[in-house]
């Protein structure tokens, strides 16, 4: 029997960003150059497939530094860590490698500078996300306040409303963040903000790529983990555009009933999801559908970040 037709619109850019690429490479090079086991504090990036792959090569994932034995190499995840973590590693004489994305580190340095200049920071982000915990850990307690929504902005009661600044998590929804920033500027006209945006290029590009195809799709699948902020945002962006959307981690998790009545399916992947998972899903879809694939590219990404000192690609 002939398979039903399925038009597949694949968003580009999608998948790995430069920060995720660098973080994974740091763990791989540490394994090659220092030997297993290499300890990694927290999931290096929010993707089970990536974490399992590194574990198979000899990485050991731990929640806290206490679980790292003396003398063992340890890597800090791409999301960034509070200052207390490298300080504790130094106290113990641990050789650590910091895989914090340089774009997250940039926000860390901005936070330090603003607090040194006497500003109180309003931080737009998601409570409990490791990046938020890491950024709060760059400045003394009480110098930064978290807001998630415009309603949170309305409830703010700063001691010195004329002396505020704001910063944001790198992986937020561009549209939601614009609304929160507008609420902040309306309530506190003197508030200082970042020159550009703290939302990173990869997050913004993946959201724009979803917007570019959403209207033409009956449904959209986003490959990513439920704890991956930028992946969850991609589902929200598609839904806002009026398209049914779902997050899947691997092809074998796909609920086929989601595809009932779908003639055009959008496909993308969060910044921590490798391209092989996209191909795996396309192959699985091809078992049941007669697929016509089309990549819709809104731009090319050429950004690459340097590795930390002391860890270099082999010549
Ligand atoms: Fe860096 Fe953005 Fe990738 Fe996060 S999503 S690791 S901030 S480039």
Image (cartoon, rainbow, N blue to C red):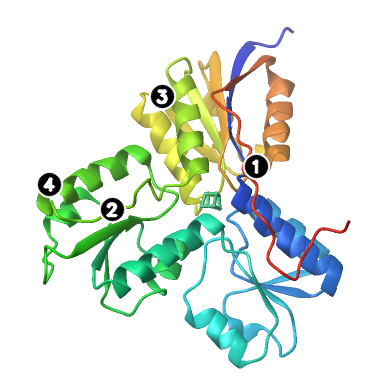
Spatial distance from mark 2 to mark 3, Cα to Cα?
33 Å
Labels 1 and 2: the sequence-earlier one = 2
Residue at (43, 26) in percent of width and height:
211
Spatial distance from mark 1 to mark 2, Cα to Cα?
39 Å
Residue annotated with mark 2: 193
Residue in front for this viewpoint, 281 or 69: 69
Mark 4, Cα crowd under 10 Å, few <14 / some 14-19 / many 20+, is: few
Residue annotated with mark 1: 250
* Foreground tag (3 vs 4): 4
Answer left or right for 311 relative to 300: right
Q: Find out whether the residues at labels 3 and 1 contact each other: C-beta distance under 8 Å.
A: no
Labels 3 and 1: the sequence-earlier one = 3
Per the image, label 2 sits on a secondary structure element best described as loop
Residue at (31, 45) in percent of width and height:
177
Labels 4 and 2: the sequence-earlier one = 4
Q: Find out whether the residues at labels 1 and 4 contact each other: C-beta distance under 8 Å.
A: no
Answer left or right for 256 relative to 213: right
Per the image, label 1 sits on a secondary structure element best described as loop
Residue 238 in picture, x, y percent from top left? 42, 30
Labels 2 and 3: the sequence-earlier one = 2
Spatial distance from mark 1 to mark 4, Cα to Cα?
43 Å
The residue at label 3 has a CB less than 8 Å from ligand 1: no
Per the image, label 4 sits on a secondary structure element best described as helix
Q: Which mark is residue 243?
A: 3
The residue at label 4 has a CB less than 8 Å from ligand 1: no
Spatial distance from mark 3 to mark 4, Cα to Cα?
32 Å
Residue annotated with mark 4: 186
Mark 1, Cα crowd under 10 Å, few <14 / some 14-19 / many 20+, is: some
Residue at (64, 52) in percent of width and height:
305
Spatial distance from mark 3 to mark 1, Cα to Cα?
21 Å
């Amino acid at each position: 029997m002939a398979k039903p037709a399925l038009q597949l619109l694949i968003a580009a850019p999608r998948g790995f960003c430069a920060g995720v690429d660098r973080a994974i490479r740091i763990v791989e090079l540490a394994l090659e150059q220092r030997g297993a086991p290499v300890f990694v504090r927290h999931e290096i990036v929010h993707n089970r497939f990536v974490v399992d792959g590194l574990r198979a090569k000899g990485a050991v994932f731990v929640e806290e530094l206490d679980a790292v034995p003396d003398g063992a190499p340890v890597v800090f995840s791409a999301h960034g860590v509070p200052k207390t973590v490298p300080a504790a590693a130094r106290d113990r004489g641990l050789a650590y490698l910091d895989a914090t994305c340089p774009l997250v580190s940039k926000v860390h340095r901005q936070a330090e500078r603003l607090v040194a200049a006497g500003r109180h920071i309003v931080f737009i982000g998601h409570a409990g996300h490791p990046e938020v915990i890491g950024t709060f850990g760059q400045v003394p307690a009480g110098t930064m306040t978290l807001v998630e929504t415009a309603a949170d902005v309305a409830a703010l009661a700063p001691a010195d409303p004329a002396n505020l600044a704001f910063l944001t998590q790198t992986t937020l929804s561009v549209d939601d963040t614009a609304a929160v920033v507008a609420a902040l500027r309306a309530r506190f006209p003197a508030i200082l903000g970042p020159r550009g945006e703290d939302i990173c290029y990869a997050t913004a590009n993946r959201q724009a790529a979803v917007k570019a195809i959403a209207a033409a799709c009956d449904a959209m699948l986003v490959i990513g983990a439920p704890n991956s902020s930028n992946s969850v945002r991609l589902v929200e962006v598609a839904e806002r555009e009026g398209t049914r959307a779902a997050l899947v981690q691997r092809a074998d998790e796909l609920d086929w009933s989601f595809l009932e009545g779908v003639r055009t399916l959008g496909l993308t992947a969060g910044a921590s999801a490798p391209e092989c998972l996209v191909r795996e899903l396309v192959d699985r879809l091809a078992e049941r559908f007669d697929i016509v694939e089309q990549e819709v590219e809104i731009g090319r990404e050429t950004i690459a970040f340097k590795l930390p000192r002391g860890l270099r690609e082999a010549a």
